[in-house]
Image (cartoon, grey):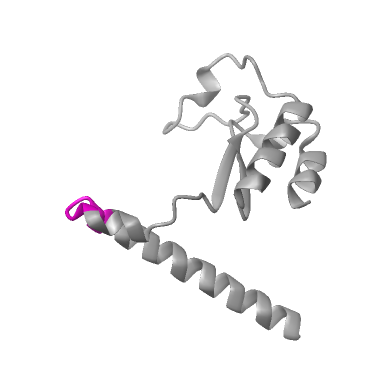
């Protein structure tokens, strides 16, 4: 139970920190000195792991594009090592449809480490 409470507190601190950064970034468009209060290190990264998509959304043309040069598992692992050294806390997978990758389960496990 205590672990669950700690996770909630940690998430709350993270979200409040993110909200502060968003407000400061927006405000800095009008008053540049505020930028010194915003962290220059990313806390979240999204990796486009595929262009393939099996949906035909009218708001997106990704499915019309021919997938090419998809990152290999090894290349994505290298990205994980690089972003870990930056202190990134959250990794997201985007695409296309990330679940179309055969190795998506393996990538998720490696991203957790």
90 in magenta: no
**Residue 103 place in picture, x, y as percent:** 80, 34
**Residue 21 place in picture, x, y as percent:** 38, 60
In the displayed structure image, the side of residue 63 where residue 19 appears, left or right: left
31 in magenta: yes
**What's the residue at 54%, 23% (across, down)?**
63
- Quadrant housing the N terminus: bottom right
**What's the residue at 75%, 35% (across, down)?**
77
Residue 96 quadrant: top right
Figure disc tally: 0
The residue closer to the viewer here, 5 or 84, is 84
- Give the answer, above or below, for where 97 lies relative to 43: above
Residue 69 quadrant: top right
In this picture, which residue range is highlighted in magenta? Answer: 26-32
In the displayed structure image, the side of residue 81 where residue 63 appears, left or right: left
**Residue 66 place in picture, x, y as percent:** 58, 13
The residue closer to the viewer here, 105 or 34, is 34
- Give the answer, above or below, for where 46 lies relative to 62: below
The residue closer to the viewer here, 47 or 56, is 47
**What's the residue at 27%, 59% (across, down)?**
34
In this view, the residue farthest toward the bottom is 2
**Residue 31 place in picture, x, y as percent:** 18, 55
In the displayed structure image, the side of residue 84 where residue 17 appears, left or right: left
């Amino acid at each position: 139970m205590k672990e669950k409470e700690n996770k909630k507190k940690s998430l709350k601190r993270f979200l409040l920190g993110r909200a502060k950064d968003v407000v400061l970034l927006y405000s800095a468009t009008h008053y540049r000195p505020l930028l010194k209060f915003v962290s220059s290190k990313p806390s979240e990264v999204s990796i486009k792991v595929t262009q393939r998509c099996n949906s035909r959304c009218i708001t997106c043309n990704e499915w019309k594009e021919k997938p090419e040069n998809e990152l290999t598992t090894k290349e994505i692992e290298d990205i994980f090592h690089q972003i870990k050294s930056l202190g990134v806390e959250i990794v997201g997978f985007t695409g296309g449809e990330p679940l179309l990758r055969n190795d998506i389960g393996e990538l998720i496990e490696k991203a957790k480490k």
